[in-house]
Amino acid sequence: MNKELENNFVELLEKHQNIIHKVCRLYTDNYDAHNDLFQEITIQLWKAYPKFRGDSKFSTWMYRVGLNTAITLYRKSKRRVTTQDFEGVEFKIKADEYDDTEEQQLKTLYKAIHKLNDIEKALVFLYLEDKDYREISETLGISEVNARVKMNRIKTKLKTLLNP
Amino acid sequence: MDGLDILKKSWNKDDPNQRKLSAKDIYPMLHKKSSSIAKTLFYISIAELVFWIIVSFIPYICSDNYKERLDKIYDSEHLFTVMTILSFGITILFIYLLFRSYKAISVTDSAKKLMENIINTRKVIKYYVLYNLIVFGFSLFFGFYYALHNDPETVKNIANFGPTEMTIMYLILFGFSALLILLFWLFYKLIYGLLLKRLNRNYKELEKIDD
């Protein structure tokens, strides 16, 4: 693959990396697993990139590949991004935005979401991304009506998980 | 406000605990090897193709004695050639089907379609293994049959066997062949079962939604 393609890809990925982080946050619950899944999604995106024709938005194309990797292709591997890779890098904690209560609420929410199955997590992801049910049904390969029904059930399930 | 709406509010904000990766971090990732199940499945399939091709064809090339025996069994050069061509043909057909189904796996399809394509690839290799086990089973059966009837040494050894002993011996041989094939089959079930456990579970979940 030529250098220009690689540069374009890296530039786009750097800009839109939050999408992958968001997928990883729903599907993993620890630092190593997050990085491992991030890397696998990046590899899958890079492999598929030459076929990306730009008729859909890069971010849309990205979350589809990201979700497919998390639900279907990802296999926990021995290959881990070691913590050494992150040595000397400062974490961007913005003190002024830090809110303990909100942080706590989100932690509890993520804990509840981690108890959902892979497909339910995918629906949650797409819902949070504000995708309409047509797009959700196309991404997962289920009917629009059933996607809506399932989403309502997930919301109820989450409520039960949060208020047992 | 339900839980998801709380999350939705902060969903698009950068996580303060998440380090933002730079281009320098991303470049090396592109050159790392994928450990996806599609790739693993492909490697296992290739290993199986190679294994069964070796099992099927090496004896023809390496052992004169084996060839002689085969000649005796088939008693016809013509039949032997037909069987070899057929065997090659079937293997090539499976290689073609495997590559075709592997090529159809696309990470940009819908989740369900992607899973179906992976399951199809697994099916191709499953049938290939099944075909080989059947051929293997027949070879064992004919091998034993040949040895018991045509091999002078074996014939001499079992000359004194009465009908009960012969029946027991046939049962043991049959049981041994069946057990060997069963073990092979269980081994494959285990490999693919472990590899595709999560995929199968997710596929069933997707199907359940549309039921």
Image (cartoon, coloured by chain):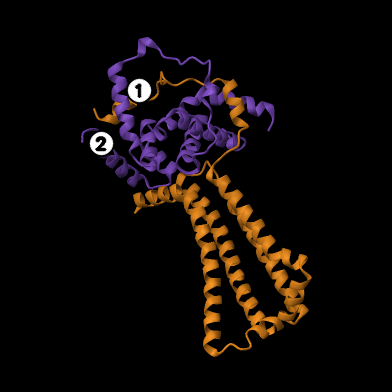
Q: Residue B131: which quarter of the image?
A: bottom right
Q: Position of residue A140 (x, y in %)?
A: 42, 43
Task: Please indicate whether residue B27 sits to the left or right of residue A21 in the image.
Answer: right
Q: Which residue is mark 1?
A: B10
Q: Position of residue A121 (x, y in %)?
A: 37, 38
Work out which quarter of the rendered image holds the C terminus of chain B and state it.
Answer: bottom left
Q: Secondary structure at mark 2?
A: helix
The shade of chain A is purple
The shade of chain B is orange
> From what the image shows, is residue B8 above or below residue B153?
above
Residue at x-position 59% and y-position 62%: B128
> From what the image shows, is residue A130 above or below residue B61?
above
Work out which quarter of the rendered image holds the N terminus of chain B and state it.
Answer: top left
Within 10 Å of the Cα at label 2, are there few (<14), some (14-19), or many (20+) other Cα atoms?
Answer: some
Considering every residue shown, the one lying at the far left of the view is: A164
Residue at x-position 30% and y-position 17%: A100
Query: Any mark on residue A161, and which?
Result: 2
Considering every residue shown, the one lying at the far top of the view is: A96
Residue B47: tell me if it is visible. Answer: yes
Q: Position of residue B110 (x, y in %)?
A: 47, 44
Asked if labels 2 and 1 touch by Cβ distance under 8 angstroms, the answer is no
Q: Residue A104: which quarter of the image?
A: top left
- Subunit under mark 1: B
Q: Nearer the viewer, residue B162 or A43?
A: B162
Closest to the camera, between mark 1 and mark 2, is: 2
Query: Any mark on residue B176, and which?
Result: none
Task: Please indicate whether residue B71 sits to the left or right of residue A136 in the image.
Answer: right
In this rendering, the count of numbered labels is 2
> Callout 2, which amino acid?
Leu
Q: Position of residue A113 (x, y in %)?
A: 33, 34
